[in-house]
Image (cartoon, coloured by chain):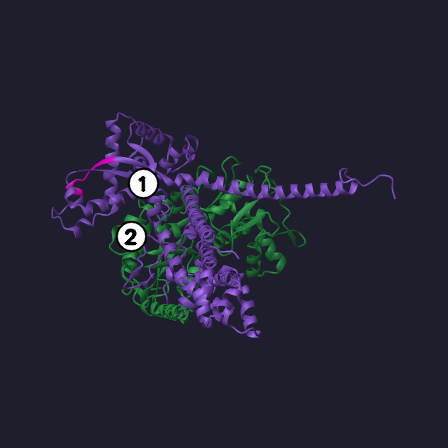
């Protein structure tokens, strides 16, 4: 016996060491969380700071005169003849309108016609032409429209373009920015929220200011519908059979192992498969949301099957036994009791699978969805069938825009990332809410 | 219930496959990432000014585009392949074996390849020989080939600053790489006298000598960029010593971040390239599957519109974006209108 009694109140060396070890471990844990949080904050702040600009856009209010002599030479209001005047014929009208406005405001400038042209988006001529062709009566009069300002001018009001960078830039000049500033002071140029970013289709490299996510959002929506309609029933049917009916033998073990492996297969592999089966063999259309949806269905199925089986497993066997005991058939016990109880888990798994599919780019590369598409895809058309018209998808649009030469597209790409993140956050929140609301514990 | 759903969805897929064989109503284009911005500009203007739907334009590189182009004739193959180099005879053979026999070649103009570095860095005036000496894997010496010893630009040319060599060149899947090898490395090899030295060393085997001239060092001083020019730009922004290879149009859209180097004393501009003064340029093409003309609505109109003066002429939007317009555009317009096929008739 030692003289010093081991009092519980006095910490001996071993206890101190153990406590210190615990303290250190807590610090490591906190550090790990800190690093993860820091990474998240950095990611979000960089995306937000560069992407938030995409949601506002600079417009110029112009009163454009539409001379009969230029737009309607024949004098007859024949739409076919009027359509012969291309967007290139409308651009000078806008330039004249802007020059008039500049002169009216008493701004003296050394800008050439070409420099003034460069202040107005090339999209503006197209919107003016569409407007005039839709309302032929306007010809001969004047029309007041808010037209898009060029990407560089827009960048100046968002802080992306500065006087210093403009001096080195071949596409704009400090003089053009000064004029733009004067016009803004007079209220002719205004930067405001831009719905077009969410609704407009993609635009070419010459007009980043006009590019939008409309086609990409539609394409993603169609693909998610295809995935939901195909993957949910197939996945649930497969898991119910495997979990409730299938005999336990080598074959079912083999299937089980394969499903787990499929869930880990790189997504690009499904793209190659989709190209071979759906496009080259079945003759479905390239770039179509249908093929995209089918490929993503293949990719999502394992995820849905695994989560559905987990949900079915978590229903206590006593429920099945009770149902069987009162005379229900096996199928009745499954569909009347087990499936409703497992439904929240299945839904959560499905939504997470969908969210995963929504953010997928690689397989879409191979089936032609990484493309420039300006026509809004119809859900059904006679020629292309259901979901057969060419479309892109949200992550693909991000990929596309990051490759463009004009710096304006970098802002658009970050803006598209924000939209994608919002979609993902909403889907995950719905999944969590469903689980919270419907989940039952035993 | 689940089995019913399973069968219905399977049937739905089958039904959809059956309906999807009706004729496509939009033009489908794929290929070179250098031609892509031009094709997109044309597609956009085409959609605005015609009653046809806007063509769908994909990227992927010249070789990949031509491979898809040659995959066969029919609705689910592309109508047009964009290419930053002329189609190879091997590719024409593959095309022919897949039934793509009638191909129209359309030259849309020229593209300059420029060498640019960070705007705040040193300014360079290159010659092809400088690039050869900086980038060759092996240089000829008295007794044989030795691994390239140059690590700084002033070792290549004493008039250059003492700046480490760090260059970003297009990867081998790009058509630009081929032009770079032939018009810069090979020329530099000849100009610097290295070609003669190599021929002396290898006993006069000219093909082997050319291959040696165009072999790029792999010790990390030269980096292959497989992505687009945006990636090259990002690398230069991260490393102020970096010098990158760009297309002229990309440089012209980023003049606030990049400064361009002269080549053999010539500043690359659309003018100097059109005049043939600037040495590193190449023609850009697109190829039309003639079997699809008249089947895919708008294909002929798109091709006509692409080469029209309004678009591809010296004052058109393509020239504004950086394309060097073709002095023989009128001949191209006639060829497109007459459906002149590759290889005569």
Q: Which quadrant of the view contains residue B156?
A: top right
* Mark 1 and mark 2 residues within 8 Å of each other at the beta carbon: no
Q: In the image, which disc is placed on residue B43?
A: none
Q: Colour of chain A?
A: purple
Q: Position of residue A131 (x, y in %)?
A: 22, 45
Q: Colour of chain B?
A: green
- For the C terminus of chain B, the quadrant is bottom left
Q: Is residue A53 above or below residue A259?
A: above
- Queried whether the magenta region covers residue A4, the answer comes back as no
Report, in whole angstroms, how far the alpha carbon at label 1 lies from the one at label 2: 17 Å
Q: Is residue B313 above or below residue B296?
A: above
Crowd rating for badge 1 (residues with CA inside 10 Å; few <14, some 14–19, many 20+): many
Q: In the image, which disc is placed on residue B46?
A: 2
Q: Secondary structure at mark 1?
A: loop
Q: Is residue A209 visible?
A: yes
Disc 2: host chain: B
Q: Secondary structure at mark 2?
A: helix
Identity of the residue drawn at 16% across and 42% down: A138
Q: Position of residue A424 (x, y in %)?
A: 44, 50
Magenta part of the protein: which range? Answer: A62-70
Residue sitting nearer the eye, B6 or A83? B6
Crowd rating for badge 2 (residues with CA inside 10 Å; few <14, some 14–19, many 20+): many
Q: Position of residue B76 (x, y in %)?
A: 36, 65
Disc 1: host chain: A
Q: Which residue position holds label 1? A: A121
- For the N terminus of chain B, the quadrant is bottom left
């Amino acid at each position: 016996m030692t003289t010093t009694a081991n009092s519980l109140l006095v910490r001996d060396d071993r206890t101190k060491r153990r406590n210190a070890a615990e303290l250190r471990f807590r610090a490591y844990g906190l550090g790990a969380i800190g690093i993860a949080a820091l990474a998240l904050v950095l990611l979000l702040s960089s995306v937000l700071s560069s992407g938030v600009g995409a949601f506002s856009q600079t417009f110029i209010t112009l009163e454009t005169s539409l001379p009969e002599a230029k737009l309607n030479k024949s004098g007859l209001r024949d739409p076919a003849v009027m359509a012969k005047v291309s967007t290139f014929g409308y651009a000078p009208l806008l330039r004249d309108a802007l020059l008039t406005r500049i002169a009216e405001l008493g701004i003296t400038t050394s800008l050439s016609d070409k420099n003034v042209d460069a202040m107005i988006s090339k999209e503006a001529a197209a919107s003016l032409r569409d407007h005039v062709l839709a309302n032929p009566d306007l010809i001969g009069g004047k029309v007041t429209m808010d037209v898009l300002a060029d990407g560089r001018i827009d960048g100046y009001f968002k802080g992306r373009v500065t006087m210093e960078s403009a001096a080195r830039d071949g596409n704009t000049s400090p003089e053009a920015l000064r004029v733009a500033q004067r016009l803004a002071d007079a209220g002719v140029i205004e930067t405001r929220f831009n719905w077009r970013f969410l609704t407009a289709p993609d635009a070419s490299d010459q007009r980043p200011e006009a590019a939008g996510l409309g086609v990409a959002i539609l394409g993603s929506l169609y693909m998610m519908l295809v995935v939901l309609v195909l993957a949910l029933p197939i996945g649930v049917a497969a898991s119910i059979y495997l979990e409730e009916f299938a005999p336990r033998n080598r074959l079912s073990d083999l299937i089980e192992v394969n499903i787990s492996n499929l869930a880990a297969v790189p997504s690009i592999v499904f793209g190659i498969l989709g190209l071979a089966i759906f496009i080259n063999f079945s003759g479905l259309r390239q770039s179509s949301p249908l093929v995209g949806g089918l490929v993503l269905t293949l990719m999502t199925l394992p995820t849905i099957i695994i989560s559905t089986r987990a949900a079915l497993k978590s229903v206590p066997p006593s429920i099945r036994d009770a149902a069987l005991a009162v005379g229900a058939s096996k199928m009745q016990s499954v569909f009347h009791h087990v499936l409703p109880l497992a439904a929240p888990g299945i839904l959560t798994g499905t939504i997470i699978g969908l969210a995963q599919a929504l953010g997928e780019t690689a397989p879409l590369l191979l089936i032609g969805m990484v493309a420039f598409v300006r026509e809004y895809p119809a859900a059904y058309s006679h020629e292309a069938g259901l979901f057969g018209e060419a479309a892109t998808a949200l992550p693909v649009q991000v990929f596309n825009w990051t490759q463009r030469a004009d710096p304006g597209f970098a802002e658009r790409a970050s803006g598209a990332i924000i939209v994608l993140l919002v979609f993902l956050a909403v889907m995950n929140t719905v999944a969590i809410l469903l689980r919270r609301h419907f989940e039952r514990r035993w | 219930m689940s089995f019913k759903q399973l069968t219905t969805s399977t049937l739905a897929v089958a039904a959809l496959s059956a309906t999807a064989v009706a004729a496509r109503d939009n033009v489908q284009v794929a290929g070179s990432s250098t031609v892509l911005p031009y094709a997109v500009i044309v597609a956009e203007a085409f959609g605005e000014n015609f009653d046809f739907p806007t063509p769908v334009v994909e990227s992927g590189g010249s070789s990949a585009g031509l491979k898809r182009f040659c995959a066969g004739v029919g609705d689910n193959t592309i109508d047009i392949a964009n290419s930053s180099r002329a189609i190879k005879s091997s590719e024409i053979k593959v095309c022919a074996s897949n039934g793509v026999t009638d191909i129209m070649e359309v030259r849309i103009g020229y593209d300059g390849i420029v060498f640019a570095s960070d705007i705040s860095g040193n300014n360079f005036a290159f010659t092809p020989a400088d690039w050869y000496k900086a980038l060759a894997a092996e240089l000829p010496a008295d007794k044989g080939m030795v691994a390239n010893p140059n690590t700084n630009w002033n070792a290549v040319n004493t008039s250059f600053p003492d700046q480490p060599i760090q260059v970003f060149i297009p990867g081998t899947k790009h058509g630009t790489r081929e032009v770079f090898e032939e018009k810069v490395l090979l020329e530099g090899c000849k100009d610097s006298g290295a070609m003669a030295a190599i021929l002396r060393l290898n006993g006069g085997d000219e093909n082997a000598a050319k291959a040696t001239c165009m072999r790029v060092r792999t010790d990390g001083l030269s980096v292959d960029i497989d992505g687009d020019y945006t990636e090259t730009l990002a690398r230069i922004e991260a490393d102020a010593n970096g010098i990158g290879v760009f297309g002229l149009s990309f440089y012209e859209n980023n003049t606030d971040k990049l400064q361009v180097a002269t080549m053999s004393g010539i500043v690359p501009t659309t003018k100097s390239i059109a005049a043939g003064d600037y040495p590193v340029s190449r023609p850009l093409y697109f190829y039309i599957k003639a079997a699809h003309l008249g089947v895919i609505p708008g294909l002929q109109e798109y091709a006509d519109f692409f080469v029209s003066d309004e678009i591809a002429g010296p004052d058109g939007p393509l020239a504004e974006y950086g394309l060097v317009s073709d002095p023989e555009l009128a001949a191209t317009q006639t060829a497109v209108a007459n459906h002149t096929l590759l290889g005569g008739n």
